[in-house]
Image (tube, rainbow, N blue to C red):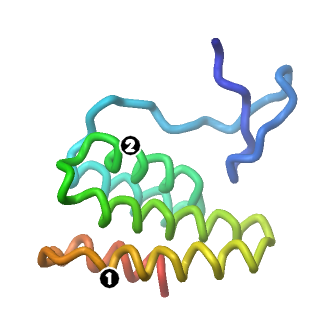
Amino acid sequence: MPERPRDRLGRPLPWDGEGFPGVEQRAEISAGQAIAEARAYLDRGLPFHAHEVLEMRWRCCPAHERPLWQGLAQAAAGLTHAARGNEEGHRRLSERARVTITAYADPLSDDVRALIDMLLS
């Protein structure tokens, strides 16, 4: 079944609408690729796309990393809500992301810390 077209903030459009280019869906994406792509999308003002990339990593990462990637994806979803004008959704998802990321016990790389700053500042 074809993907429904979406606008630049990920909102569904009519099936015959002209959609904004989405994220290439992959079964596997490395941590480095996910971080670089998410940062690039955030730099371009595309938090929904960053969320999609982070969610892809969440689905394929080792089990012990899932809380980190879940929290990063939640934070990007929160920014998507903010961009859509939903401040309450932004606040709630950002709070949830902070809790989820804080629960991750492993040390964080500088790249991950920089991404967290972009997502939750």
Q: Residue at x 41, y 57 (%)?
A: 38
Q: Residue at x 82, y 35 (%)?
A: 13
Mark 1, secondary structure of its residue: helix
Mark 2, secondary structure of its residue: helix
Q: Quadrant of residue 100?
A: bottom left
Q: Is residue 73 above or below residue 100?
A: above
Q: Residue at x 31, y 64 (%)?
A: 67
Asked whether the beta carbons under mark 2 and mark 1 sit within 8 Å of each other, the answer is no
Check disc 1 and give the amino acid type. Thr
According to the picture, the residue beneath numbered tag 1 turns out to be 102
Q: Quadrant of the N terminus?
A: top right
Mark 2 or mark 1: whose residue is earlier in sequence? 2
Q: Nearer the viewer, residue 5 or 93?
A: 93
According to the picture, the residue beneath numbered tag 2 turns out to be 56
Q: Residues within 10 Å of mark 1 (few under 14, many from 20)?
A: few
Q: Residue at x 26, y 34 (%)?
A: 28
Residue lying at the far top in this picture: please name it.
1
Q: Is residue 32 above or below residue 115?
A: above
